[in-house]
Image (tube, grey):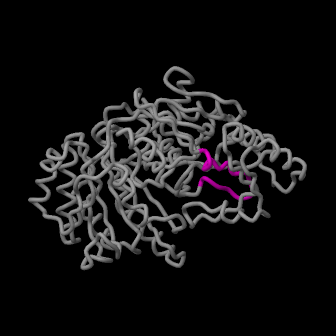
Amino acid sequence: MEQRHQPIDALEESTIQQLASQLRGALIRTSDADYEQARQVYNAMIDKHPALIVRCVDVADVIAAVNFAREHELTLAIRGGGHNGPGQGTCDDGLVIDLSEMKGIRVDPVARTARVEGGCTWGDVDHATHPFGLATPSGFISTTGVGGLTLGGGIGYLSRTLGLTIDNLLGVDMVLADGSFVTANVQENADLFWAVRGGGGNFGVVTSFLFQLHPISMVYGGPMLWSLDEAANVLRYWRDYILTAPDEVNGWFGFVTVPPAPPFPEQFHLQKMCAIVWCSTAPQEEAEKLLQPIRTNIPPAVDFAGPIPWPVLQTLFDALYPKGLQWYWKADFFTDLSDKAIDLHVKYGAQLPTMHSTMHLYPINGVVHRVGANETAFSFREANFSEVVVGVDPDPANNERMIQWARDYWMALHPYSAGGGYVNMMMDEGTDNVKAAYRDNYERLAQIKAKYDPNNLFHVNQNIKPAS
């Protein structure tokens, strides 16, 4: 049964004061001086006005906020540390649990684990783990939130080498819809642990994650760029190479507009080009050998691939994508890239509508394929590529144009896709698309949802409806 929602202005002042008295963190209301700043999310296309924002500093704050939202039948949104594209970290008129103050990280260098609180970004994690020469698979930008990326699966630079982020998740601490606190891992609440590995924020508020770390410090990586004339050749070469490459090699393909800034040579500024951004965990000499064929066969116009500290690779694109840009995302999985699909990529990739707009194809074979489709909630284990088309710009005046381009691009390629998309890179697209993302796993997720959140308190997400 669905939760009913009442307007927050029906609540007595004394009731709201009671919530404030239970919190160590700040309770921000619409009349507060810091409200405007506090309500803003990464994607400026999302403009919502929650009535209350609870800036939690500990688990007790989370429990108090969840109980308050449930008891007063308020719309509840959970915001972690980062990016959520469709703006599911906020809501109109309801209550937002903001975890961004919960940034504790504890690294155990002997066990090679990190306990990471729910408000951290991947930059926070890299900062804590890199001095120990350790890392865990994450995404592509260090300002991404740990919570959102992990709960949706976690595709990134190390996917082929070490699997998805969820394949390196050992357990979570959570606050459930009834306000209770639980741990979920292989031994305890194993059904819940299965569900959070890809099932998004549907099951509760994850207050901390326990990750397996790996000895990764320096990698061999960075971008190579080619003119658009070479795009079809580069994309075909990359497709064939990455499907059979050793697990130590990752590299995503993209269409980009070269930023008018160093380190890019001036003659390429604002030019549309295609790129592969590499990340190899092989020793330097071996990595050089692995990338030599592409350098010989299709010499890049710009070649920045080389030895680079892992946290630096993670931050390469941070400055290009600050908070507050307009974003529109479309996503699909692909098992193969036919020559016809490649021709369509080249056609639409040449039409990037703004400097920040882009299309990326991430390889998700290698170690990702060695986990079964039903072993975690993330179901597209046989897919080889994850596509994301994003229209991005600082100016809302360009929204219509870039949204149209992203939709046209996605529609053209969708007939060649595996039929579902990566939930972390979709807008709010409704139940059918959520079902397509989870396929055979949806029914089991709906049953686990009914067990842990029968009234769908946690519905501001890529929502899985509780099984009736």
* Residue sitting at the far top: 187
Name the quadrant of the C terminus.
top right
Which residue appears at 31% of the width and 65% of the height?
255
- Percent across and percent down for residue 286 are 15, 44
- Percent across and percent down for residue 141 are 42, 55
Which residue appears at 59% of the width and 60% of the height?
41
From the viewer's side, name the closer residue of 320 and 205.
Answer: 320
Which span is picked out in magenta?
88-102
Image vertical order of residue 299 relative to residue 121, above or below: below
Per the image, is 221 magenta?
no
**Total numbered labels placed on residues in the image:** 0
Name the quadrant of the N terminus.
top right
* Residue sitting at the far left: 296
- Percent across and percent down for residue 290 are 15, 48
* Residue sitting at the far front: 131
Per the image, is 97 magenta?
yes
Would residue 50 be found to the left or right of residue 46 on screen?
right
Residue 341 in view (yes/no): no
Would residue 318 be found to the left or right of residue 450 on screen?
left
Image vertical order of residue 359 relative to residue 138, above or below: below
Question: Which of the 4 image quadrants contains residue 47?
Answer: bottom right
Would residue 19 be found to the left or right of residue 361 on screen?
right
Image vertical order of residue 356 relative to residue 248, above or below: below
Which residue appears at 51% of the width and 44% of the height?
435
From the viewer's side, name the closer residue of 88 and 210.
Answer: 210
User: Which secondary structure type mostly characterizes the magenta part of the structure?
Assistant: loop
Which residue appears at 23% of the width and 71% of the height?
228
Residue 122 in view (yes/no): yes
From the viewer's side, name the closer residue of 159 and 62.
Answer: 62
- Percent across and percent down for residue 18 are 85, 44
